[in-house]
């Protein structure tokens, strides 16, 4: 198979949701359909029940043993499907955001009864920033829900994306009868006692009496609703989906394996394969013959005796080959990888080659940081991973003077893995850790102790936001830095960051310095 054919059959995506909407359940059902796993229960739920660091570490340990769960690849109907796992806990959303830079599309799972929840909104915002194509799966139709037209309105309103139902449910809760597939004109009936897939019934014309025989009184409602859909929603526009402007919507019940196959079948047909990716220097097409890729995730081995890590490379163009020399742009050094691994659902294996859309794991002893680019020699840098302003800030101090070196090394490496963000105050030189949630601080403390033998102490720092600043005139920045010298820090890339104590002080700064643009993400 040629490069283009290999690219065309790749589908690399992430499933995202607010916790509990059914991401884990859906992932597992997709893997079952893909034949990647045989029995349910194989996908570990990455939920943290108590919200404690030790809980999180236990989950990580289990995952560490089979790093494979980070990427689940399988073959389906001639397609190579790669599902990228994202952490469920909201304190680790930054990790999810980074993973989203490595996917070509996203499936958002929404709980039919709960509708759009806060994390769904944040995740969608990131997808919009990159114009990532989004498909929506409305889950838990076996539970009582509100009106589905209202839910679609809510999605359009809150997620700021147009929707287009490609299937439509017949009732919900205990009256849930099944789903009519608008795309294929077929009907699948729901029976909670059966979890295998029954054949769908072809419905050429909704006026057929067969429909009345199958679903009785609900047939008329379905006819009306489908007519309404066809009247209200424009025809499904594939290009608009690929541009991230419209989200096709599917309904089902992941728990009962219902509506999952339709989702997967439609997904492989309409979801994009890799096409291109922006680098600082130029746009790189996936079908260019030379290999390029970037690191979007680093997974530390949790076993303290083996401080090895795995760097996850997303292949962006060309063919990746084992034992070939590749250029590490940031270090300006060549590397050869003798044991790159691919992730096929529950196992990982050494591979000889990989194609755009694939994720390859390479053992790393500390050469990589998130965002690094690899090429065949061309001077290219894939656009940075976005960092979002953290929500919580703490000074980090050494609590064991004998272990200062270990602490410095540990902090460095954890930040390279993207566990949290590090800022250095330019006025007093103190290190500030920025996190999204409390759990991250606990994990840092735990890992510093268990993996590096270092002890840290956090000191509270009431701070509102970290803002990356930008201005057309360097003198304006210089003046601002002079005036706000106590509040200036640099991030780990050395970029200037204004640490705003409060919303009020931020607004004051924005009013006083009209020529400065204050950004809440590092990518602008
Ligand atoms: P998440 O990864 O998005 O956090 O959600 P997960 O799949 O873990 O699902 C959250 C809960 O919702 C689970 O129940 C799961 O069984 C249930 N669930 C998922 N899909 C459906 C569905 O289609 N219908 C119904 N009725 N429930 C669904 P739990 O009790 O929290 O977990 P567990 O203890 O049973 O594993």
Image: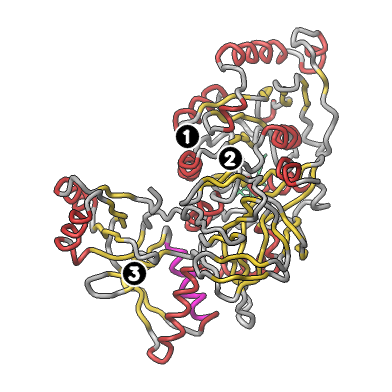
Other-residue count near label 3 (Cα within 10 Å), few / some / many at <14 / 14–19 / ≥20: many
Labels 3 and 1: the sequence-earlier one: 1
Tell me the number on the disc at residue 432.
Answer: 3
Labels 2 and 1: the sequence-earlier one: 2
Secondary structure beneath dot 2 equals strand
Residue 357: x percent and y percent? Answer: 66, 49
Q: Name the dominant secondary structure of the magenta segment.
A: helix
Labels 2 and 3: the sequence-earlier one: 2
Residue 157 in magenta stretch:
no
Q: Which residue is mark 2?
A: 108
Q: Which residue is mark 1?
A: 159
Residue 209 occupies which quadrant of the picture? top right
C-alpha distance separating marks 3 and 1: 33 Å
Q: Are marks 2 and 1 in contact (CB under 8 Å)?
A: yes
Residue 464: x percent and y percent? Answer: 28, 56
For the magenta stretch, what is the residue range? 438-450
x 73%, y 65%: residue: 322
Other-residue count near label 2 (Cα within 10 Å), few / some / many at <14 / 14–19 / ≥20: many
Q: Is mark 2 within 8 Å of ligand 1?
A: no
x 80%, y 53%: residue: 37
x 29%, y 74%: residue: 430
C-alpha distance separating marks 2 and 1: 11 Å
Q: Is residue 237 left or right of residue 473?
A: right
Q: Are marks 3 and 1 in contact (CB under 8 Å)?
A: no
On screen, residue 488 above or below 202: below
Residue 326 occupies which quadrant of the picture? bottom right
C-alpha distance separating marks 2 and 3: 34 Å
Secondary structure beneath dot 3 equals strand
Q: Is residue 360 left or right of residue 379?
A: right
Q: Is residue 222 left or right of residue 349?
A: left
Secondary structure beneath dot 1 equals helix
């Amino acid at each position: 198979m040629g490069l283009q054919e290999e690219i065309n059959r790749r589908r690399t995506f992430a499933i995202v949701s607010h916790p509990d909407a059914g991401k884990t359940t859906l992932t597992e059902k997709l893997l079952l359909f893909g034949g990647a796993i045989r029995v349910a229960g194989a996908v570990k739920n990455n939920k943290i029940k108590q919200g404690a660091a030790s809980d999180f570490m236990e989950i990580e340990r289990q995952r560490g043993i089979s790093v494979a769960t980070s990427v689940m690849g399988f073959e389906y109907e001639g397609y190579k499907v790669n599902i990228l796992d994202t952490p469920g806990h909201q304190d680790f959303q930054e990790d999810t955001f980074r993973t989203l830079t490595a996917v070509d599309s996203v499936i958002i799972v929404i709980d039919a009864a709960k509708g759009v929840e806060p994390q769904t909104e944040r995740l969608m915002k990131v997808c919009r920033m990159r114009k990532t194509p989004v498909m929506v799966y409305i889950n838990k139709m076996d539970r009582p829900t509100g009106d589905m037209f209202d839910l679609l309105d809510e999605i359009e309103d809150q997620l700021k994306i147009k929707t287009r139902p490609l299937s439509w449910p017949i009732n919900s809760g205990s009256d849930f009868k099944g789903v009519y597939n608008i795309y294929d004109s077929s009907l699948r009936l729901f029976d909670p006692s059966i979890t295998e897939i029954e054949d769908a019934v072809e419905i050429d014309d909704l006026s057929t009496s067969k429909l009345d025989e199958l679903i009785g009184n609900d047939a008329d409602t379905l006819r009306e609703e489908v007519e309404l859909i066809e009247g209200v929603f424009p025809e499904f526009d594939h290009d608009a989906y690929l541009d991230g402007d419209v989200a096709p919507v599917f309904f089902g019940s992941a728990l009962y394996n219902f509506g999952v196959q339709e989702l997967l079948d439609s997904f492989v047909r309409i979801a994009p394969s890799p096409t291109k990716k922006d680098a600082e220097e130029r746009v790189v097409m996936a079908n260019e013959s030379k290999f390029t890729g970037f690191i979007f995730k680093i997974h530390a081995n949790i076993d303290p005796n083996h401080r090895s890590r795995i760097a996850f490379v997303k292949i962006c163009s060309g063919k990746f080959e084992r034992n070939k020399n590749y250029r590490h742009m940031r270090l300006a050094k060549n590397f050869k990888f003798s044991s790159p691994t691919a992730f096929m659902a529950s196992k990982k294996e050494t591979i000889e080659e990989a194609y755009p859309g694939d994720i390859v794991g390479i053992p790393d002893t500390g050469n990589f940081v998130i965002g690094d680019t690899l090429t065949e020699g061309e001077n290219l840098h894939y656009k940075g991973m976005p960092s979002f302003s953290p929500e919580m800030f703490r000074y980090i101090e050494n609590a064991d003077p004998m272990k200062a070196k270990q602490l410095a090394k540990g902090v460095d490496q954890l930040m390279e893995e993207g566990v949290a963000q590090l800022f250095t105050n330019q006025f007093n030189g103190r290190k500030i850790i920025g996190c999204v949630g409390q759990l991250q601080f606990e994990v840092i403390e735990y890992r510093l102790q268990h993996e590096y033998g270092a002890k840290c102490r956090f000191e509270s720092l009431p701070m509102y936001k970290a803002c990356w600043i930008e201005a057309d005139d360097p003198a304006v920045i210089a003046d601002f830095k002079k005036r706000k010298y106590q509040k200036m820090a640099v991030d780990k890339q050395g970029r200037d960051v204004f640490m705003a104590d409060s919303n009020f002080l931020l607004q004051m700064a924005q009013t006083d310095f009209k020529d400065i643009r204050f950004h809440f993400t590092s990518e602008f």
